[in-house]
Image (tube, rainbow, N blue to C red):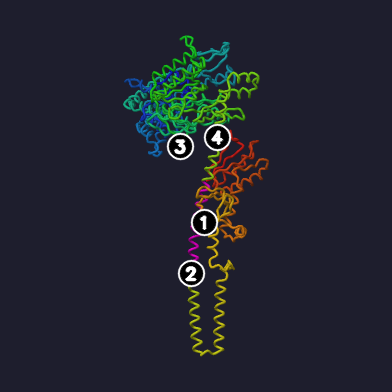
């Protein structure tokens, strides 16, 4: 059910219908456009949407769809069904052209992949045109729409005779004209004229009796007469008879063709019907291209979950003005069925309401809608709308009476599969009473689990929405600094009317506004201000949540990298120790062999002094060699302490000391040192570089004052140096770069370095503040950003956060 009767005019669907008709190439297609109807059956609607989506995709790949000679021969084909009737020559030529177009359309679809045009192919397969029909027409009619000479032997003979007679007439009349010129009866520049299809000689009236023949015409002044010479008369009569015979033969040819095509007429009529349907679907697909529409995910239940929805007519209007439309995100489901939209006047409330109504109606008429492809849509069996002034002098209805009559129909005829749209709910009468009635109506519709969208300024309707009762608030956002609407819908909170702010902006007398504030009362003003403050705080909270999310993501990645590095170092440590053990074992074995050989040689030489001295020299050389092998690996000098285990003693002393906030500590297991920022029970939070780290209190050790400096000068591996450098960069890195006031080349160099650092530090999102101006700096930066493959996307900041003056860069 649709209510009221002018529902389509209310939501401006009549404009959409005209656009589709204009896109059609044929009268049949335009006829289908006029027959568009609201569909509630899921399978039927899905088929209509699939057809249009298939054609939309096909036009992207193959835009060269046949676009001419879409003649509708259906009335002529119905007429020649009667025996003895025949098709007119001009209609035969149209039949030839239109059948050629039909075959071109079939050919257009034949090259497409069948799986991609499943629904369209089911239509195309029903178009059957016997190939003998266009061949027969082509044999009978030429490219100019005339019957060919060889259409029949008799016609060929007749036309041959006519041509012969015409040649004879030309000779005779030229001879007569030449004789008249020689006799001086006509001027030398006179030529043969045509009157009533016959050749004649123009001659002055004074000489009209000097040429034998018949006067067929005379000039307006009567001074010139047009004479057909007598010797030409007989030939012209014969030609006239031959032309009549030609006409009779042509009619016979048309009758023969009509008799030939008569058995194929039902199939041809179906072909014209289907080609009109294909043209209509193409027109819908073309509309989808014009308004950037797609097919959302369709559900067989009442549901609206749209992302980036746009009013198609508003989009086209703004496109002409090079303006952008603020898209709409809206969700209506079983938990939140009714959306109460509030906000400032001229802030977009009514446009938002009409957008939802128009798109839902378009969808259920088989049209694609301008939303994101992952949007979800459902089906409603009834649609009701109350918008605009419906007062009627004839029916004795005031504005408010007409609104109440609409509300009555809504309440009596709606159900859980219905959706209603009410603009400026409750207005038109005394505010307190109107608000109370509106609240009662809304409560009744909510109890019936009806879906709906309403706009209002009434506070009692705003506070009616609460979690779990099926009603949800929505606010049209407002820039409180610039005092102008943002035309953006924010679901989940009520909006303020900003009446006083708007009045001040337009220069309304402050004395009157101050008096109005007093009359309004502090309670109402506080409510409005609280709404504004809540909106500001919510935006700030969302911004901080995003920053925390990015920081948490970065920290998780850094921890993963650290754990990976720690594992690699631990593996390397084990390998180094094993290698050192093997080298030591080899040295011991080598030394043992040398000692044993030396002892043996001494014994064999019976302690000869010279020999013993030589052997001692060799042992000392081997000792030096071993010493040189080990020496480079020694980095730490032995402690002069006499204690057997100084490390254990120090460790014991450190554990006995009580840790407090501000102490410098280290985590031996992870080679981390930093400052204690807080102690919570048995856990401690340590700040190292620009990162905070939480661990157990038992795992940390205090760094003595005399050991702080040596630790800072501790030898670093190449990797730790890189890590420290990255930590330094991270601690100094800012999520926003300001290049305002710089020249183009300077700004680009700053952006290059900034983006390189962001990529190195694995930052996900940054902001570049370049200002608005004439947009030159913005364009240079955007051109550079397009060349960086590591950038996932970049976009302008939201208008309330800086708009075109700030670019948000999102990295992969």
In three-dimensional space, the C-alpha distance between marks 4 and 1, rounded to whole angstroms, equals 40 Å
Residue 60 is a magenta residue: no
**Nearest-to-viewer mark from 4 and 3:** 4
Going from the N terminus, do you reach mark 2 or mark 4 first? 4
Look at the numbered disc 3 and give the secondary structure of its residue. loop
* 292, 598: nearer the viewer: 598
Which is more N-terminal, label 1 or label 2?
Answer: 2
Q: Are marks 4 and 1 in contact (CB under 8 Å)?
A: no
Residue 488: tell me if it is visible. yes
Q: Which residue bears the numbered disc 3? A: 62
Q: Which mark, by number, is residue 581?
A: 2
Q: Earlier in the sequence, mark 4 or mark 3?
A: 3
Q: Which mark is residue 539?
A: 4
The earlier-in-sequence mark between 4 and 1 is 4
The label nearer to you, 2 versus 3, is 2
Q: Which span is picked out in magenta?
A: 553-581
Which residue is more in the foreground, 568 or 34?
Answer: 568
- Left or right: 732 as drawn, with respect to 394: right
The residue that mark 1 highlights is 670
């Amino acid at each position: 059910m649709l209510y009221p009767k002018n529902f389509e005019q209310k939501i401006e669907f009549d404009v959409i219908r005209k656009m589709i008709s204009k896109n059609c190439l044929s009268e049949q297609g335009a006829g289908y456009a006029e027959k568009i109807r609201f569909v509630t059956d899921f399978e039927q609607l899905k088929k209509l949407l699939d057809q249009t989506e298939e054609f939309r995709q096909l036009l992207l790949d193959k835009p060269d769809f046949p676009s001419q000679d879409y003649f509708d021969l259906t009335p002529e084909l119905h007429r020649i069904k009667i025996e003895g009737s025949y098709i007119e020559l001009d209609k035969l030529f149209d039949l030839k052209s239109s059948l050629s177009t039909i075959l071109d359309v079939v050919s257009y679809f034949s090259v497409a992949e069948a799986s991609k045009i499943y629904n369209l192919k089911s239509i195309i397969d029903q178009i059957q045109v016997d190939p003998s029909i266009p061949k027969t027409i082509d044999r009978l009619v030429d490219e100019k729409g005339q019957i060919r000479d060889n259409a029949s032997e008799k016609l060929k003979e007749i036309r041959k005779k006519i041509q012969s007679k015409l040649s004879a007439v030309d000779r005779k009349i030229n001879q007569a004209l030449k004789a008249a010129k020689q006799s001086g009866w006509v001027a030398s520049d006179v030529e043969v004229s045509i009157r009533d299809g016959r050749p004649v000689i123009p001659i002055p009236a004074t000489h009209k009796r000097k040429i034998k023949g018949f006067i067929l015409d005379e000039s307006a002044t009567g001074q010139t007469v047009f004479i057909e010479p007598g010797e030409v008369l007989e030939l012209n009569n014969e030609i006239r008879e031959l032309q009549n015979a030609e006409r009779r033969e042509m009619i016979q040819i048309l009758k023969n063709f009509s008799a030939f095509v008569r058995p194929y007429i039902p199939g041809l009529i179906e072909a014209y019907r289907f080609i009109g349907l294909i043209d209509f679907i193409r027109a819908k697909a073309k509309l989808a291209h014009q308004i950037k529409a797609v097919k959302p995910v369709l559900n067989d239940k009442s549901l609206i979950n749209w992302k980036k929805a746009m009013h198609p007519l508003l989009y086209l209007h703004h496109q002409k003005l090079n303006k952008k439309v603020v898209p709409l995100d809206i969700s209506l489901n079983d938990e939140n069925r009714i959306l109460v939209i509030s906000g400032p006047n001229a802030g977009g409330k009514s446009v938002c309401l009409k957008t939802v109504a128009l798109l839902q109606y378009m969808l259920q008429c088989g049209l694609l809608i301008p939303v994101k492809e992952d949007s979800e849509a459902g089906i409603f069996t009834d649609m009701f709308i109350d918008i605009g002034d419906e007062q009627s002098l004839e029916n004795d209805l005031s504005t408010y009476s007409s609104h109440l009559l609409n509300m009555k129909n809504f309440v009596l005829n709606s159900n859980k599969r219905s959706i209603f749209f009410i603009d400026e709910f409750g207005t038109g009468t005394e505010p307190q009473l109107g608000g109370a009635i509106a609240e009662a109506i809304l409560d009744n519709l909510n109890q019936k689990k009806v879906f709906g969208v309403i706009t209002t300024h009434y506070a009692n309707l705003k506070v009616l929405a609460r979690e779990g009762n099926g009603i949800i608030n929505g606010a049209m956002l407002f820039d409180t600094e610039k005092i102008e609407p943002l035309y953006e819908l924010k679901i989940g909170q009520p909006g303020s009317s900003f009446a006083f702010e708007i009045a001040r902006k337009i220069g309304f007398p402050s004395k009157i506004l101050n008096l109005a504030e007093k009359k309004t009362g502090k309670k109402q003003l506080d409510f409005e201000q609280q709404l504004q403050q809540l909106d500001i705080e919510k935006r700030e909270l969302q911004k901080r949540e995003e920053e925390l999310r990015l920081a948490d993501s970065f920290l998780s990645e850094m921890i993963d990298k650290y754990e990976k590095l720690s594992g690699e170092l631990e593996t390397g440590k084990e390998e180094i120790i094993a290698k050192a053990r093997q080298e030591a074992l080899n040295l011991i074995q080598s030394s043992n062999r040398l000692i044993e050989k030396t002892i043996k040689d001494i014994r064999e030489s019976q302690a000869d002094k010279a020999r013993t001295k030589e052997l001692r020299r060799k042992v000392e050389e081997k000792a030096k060699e071993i010493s040189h092998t080990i020496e480079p690996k020694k980095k730490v000098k032995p402690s002069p302490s006499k204690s057997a285990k100084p490390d254990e003693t120090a460790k014991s002393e450190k554990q006995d000391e009580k840790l407090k906030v501000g102490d410098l500590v280290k985590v031996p297991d992870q080679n981390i040192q930093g400052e204690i920022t807080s102690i919570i029970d048995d856990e401690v939070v340590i700040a190292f570089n620009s990162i905070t780290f939480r661990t157990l209190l038992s795992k940390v050790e205090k760094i003595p004052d005399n050991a702080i400096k040596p630790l800072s000068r501790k030898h670093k591996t190449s990797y730790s140096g890189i890590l420290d450098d990255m930590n330094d960069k991270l601690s100094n890195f800012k999520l926003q770069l300001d290049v305002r006031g710089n020249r183009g080349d300077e700004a680009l160099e700053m952006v290059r370095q900034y983006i390189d650092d962001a990529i190195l530090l694995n930052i996900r999102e940054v902001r570049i503040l370049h200002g608005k101006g004439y947009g030159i700096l913005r364009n240079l930066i955007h051109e550079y950003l397009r060349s960086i493959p590591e950038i996932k996307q970049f976009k302008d900041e939201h208008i309330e956060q800086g708009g075109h003056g700030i670019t948000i860069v999102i990295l992969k």
